[in-house]
Amino acid sequence: MKITNIALGFFTAAAIFTAGCTANQTVSEESLGLRKTNLYTEDTTVGDKTVYNQKAAGESKLIERAFENAPPMISHSVEGMLPITINNNMCTSCHTPGIAEAMNATPIPKSHFTDFRPDTSLAKDGSIVKNGKMVENTSDFKTTSKSLDALSGTRFNCTLCHAPQSMETVAPANNFQGDFRSEGLNSRSNLIDNINEGVK
């Protein structure tokens, strides 16, 4: 039985090797990716021009989120709105809650008006102290949250997460379908409700 299995293994390996030798087919590097020009020079390679939606804020159509709590894409032109600084943020003039509804804009979610950073320090013996408690393992530490009256200093730069959608059709089709756990999450955030999900 053992000799039969060994012989069968050798026969299979020989068959695969022989098939590989007879199917001597070459594949060019250019055919493996999206780019079909010379991979070793940029002389003749010109990228496709990126075209963004030119509709003004309030005139554009909302782009559904790609997945639950994904930062939504900016569906309108950002001409004249950038750069964003902590003292000059044009996004807040339409997207601040209370104003957003009247402007037909998506309101900034509660998570952006929340400080998730715990007060952290080191004790004299080198132990980590978070919110007044000694902790040994910081990876399982539940997120703290303190509501703020203003936009969190960690969330003022909107374009770190939100970007205008390119209107190009040259890119490969995206067949990804987001799976949302409840209705309406393709157009709003529930991150503030489940920020500690999966943390012990």
Image (tube, grey):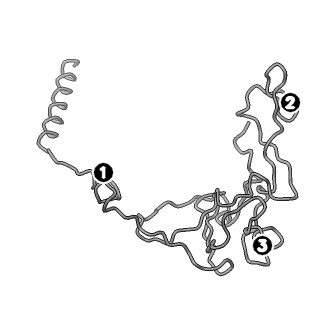
For disc 2, the neighbor class at 10 Å (few under 14, some 14 to 19, many from 20) is few
Q: Which residue is mark 3?
A: 100
Look at discs 2 and 1 and give the one toward the viewer: 1
Q: Which residue is mark 2?
A: 133
Q: Which of the two labelled residues, at mark 3 and mark 1, occupies the earlier sequence position?
A: 1
On screen, 90 above or below 114?
below
Q: Amino acid at mark 3?
A: Ala
For disc 3, the neighbor class at 10 Å (few under 14, some 14 to 19, many from 20) is some
Q: Amino acid at mark 2?
A: Lys
Q: Which of the two labelled residues, at mark 2 and mark 1, occupies the earlier sequence position?
A: 1
Tag 1's secondary structure?
loop
Q: Which residue is mark 1?
A: 40
On the picture, is 27 further left or further right than 114? Answer: left
On the picture, is 197 further left or further right than 31? Answer: right
Q: Amino acid at mark 1?
A: Tyr
The quarter of the image holding the N terminus is top left
Question: In the rendered structure, are the residues bearing label 3 and label 1 in contact, judged by CB atoms less than 8 Å apart?
Answer: no
On screen, 187 above or below 30?
below
In the orientation shown, which residue stands out farthest toward the front? Answer: 43
On screen, 105 above or below 39?
below
Give residue 91's position: percent from left, percent from top: 72, 68
Q: Which residue is painted at 74% across and 50% down in the image?
A: 194
